[in-house]
Image (spheres, rainbow, N blue to C red):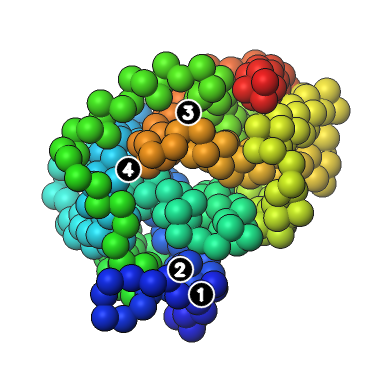
Amino acid sequence: MTTMIFSGRAAAVSAPEAKPAHAPFAATLVTFVATALLATGQLYGVIPLLGAMGREWHAPASALTWMASAFGFGYAAGFLVFGPLSDRFGRRRIIVTGISATAVTTALVGLAPGLGAAIALRVLQGVTTAAFAPVAFTYIAERAEPRHRPTLLSAVIGAFLASAVFGQLAAQGIAAVAGWRAVFAVFAVAFALVAAALRRVMLPGGPGAAGSPLDAYRAMPGLLADRRLIPLYLATPVVLGSFVALYTGLALTGAAGGAAALLTLRAAALPAILAIPFVTPALQRVPGARRATGALTLSVLSAALIGLAHPGTLGLAILLNVFVAGIGLTAPALIETIGGRAGAARGTAVSLFTFILFVGASVGPQVAGALSAHGLPTLAYVLAALLAAGAALTLTARR
């Protein structure tokens, strides 16, 4: 693991040893990106395994799709649990405990005797995995040095997007050598390793606010009714929802030309994902809501061109890079703006954002399924319209 580098001066504390004022940048970047790839990769990693599961359990494809959906719904629901709890018990404690528990739940999925038990365990796996994302966003906002925050947020968001490729490729490779059950065993070991790394890298302590953990949930109605936050929350579902819908549509419509070509197109968007952490700091002077509007507009234009131009493989790869860049720049801008406007309820506000973000991602495949019969251009036009609505909402939030 990368050597820990501490930025800033040590803060004066009452404990015998001084603690760093800011989280170590390099070590936090490496461990958070690795955890994000592994965590969200569980949503996609099961896809290449469905055929082998179906053959072993004699289950139809329609039932096996719940192996992906079950994790997604548990994942989204868990955000509402762990974000608020971290306001009370501290960021590091919640993340390390949750990821440690995920090592166990992931191993149990690999031991499932049948589809019903596997689906139930996938829900549980999704819930425990959710300890990372919303708490990590809040931790970065609170403990990272201000000049490093945009890079860290963008890198984690980029890892969430890249996990669509990472999860499937890793699962395919492991299953080809040792079978589908071994995939969950390897992932379980990986979760245990990153949990140990997170415990070492993350700064101890945290909010530790007095009062009941229920206080965070009592704050949710007020956050959802806050006129400064309403348009931002309304724009959030289209961010990952459009990303997942577009890639699902590529597979369902056959526009990608097969499974291998689809993975190639996903990998083709990696340059944009890798560039996002380097571009974001240069845009930091632009207010978050304005950045979100501009980034969403970028995705609107690329989605519209996918529908209008009927591009070939190369053209589609270029437009997907632009589309993904817009999505990847939007998410950290929204997190920054929502967290800044929420004040003391930052953890709860970011948890609501992450919950809505991944609910949108869970709905994305349904949108693609409903429109795929009409072809990729129709889906692209609908996504462009939804993204345009999101851009309009963030524009009102700027005011």
- Give residue 360's mark: 3
Instruction: Name the spot of residue 316 as percent of width and height, x first.
Output: 77, 40
Q: Secondary structure at mark 1?
A: loop
CB atoms at circles 2 and 1 under 8 Å apart?
yes
Amino acid type at mark 2: Ala
Quadrant containing the N terminus is bottom left
Q: Which residue is mark 4?
A: 83
Amino acid type at mark 3: Gly
Q: Earlier in the sequence, mark 2 or mark 1?
A: 1
- Give residue 303's mark: none
| Mark pair 1, 4: CA separation | 28 Å
Q: Which residue is mark 2?
A: 21
Quadrant containing the C terminus is top right
- Residue at image x 83%, y 35%? 311
Q: Earlier in the sequence, mark 3 or mark 4?
A: 4
Is the residue marked by circle 4 packed among few (<14), some (14-19), or many (20+) residues within 10 Å? many
- Residue at image x 33%, y 26%? 220
| Mark pair 2, 3: CA separation | 36 Å
Is the residue marked by circle 3 packed among few (<14), some (14-19), or many (20+) residues within 10 Å? many
Q: Which residue is mark 1?
A: 9
Instruction: Name the spot of residue 58 as percent of width and height, x first.
Output: 24, 40
| Mark pair 3, 4: CA separation | 18 Å
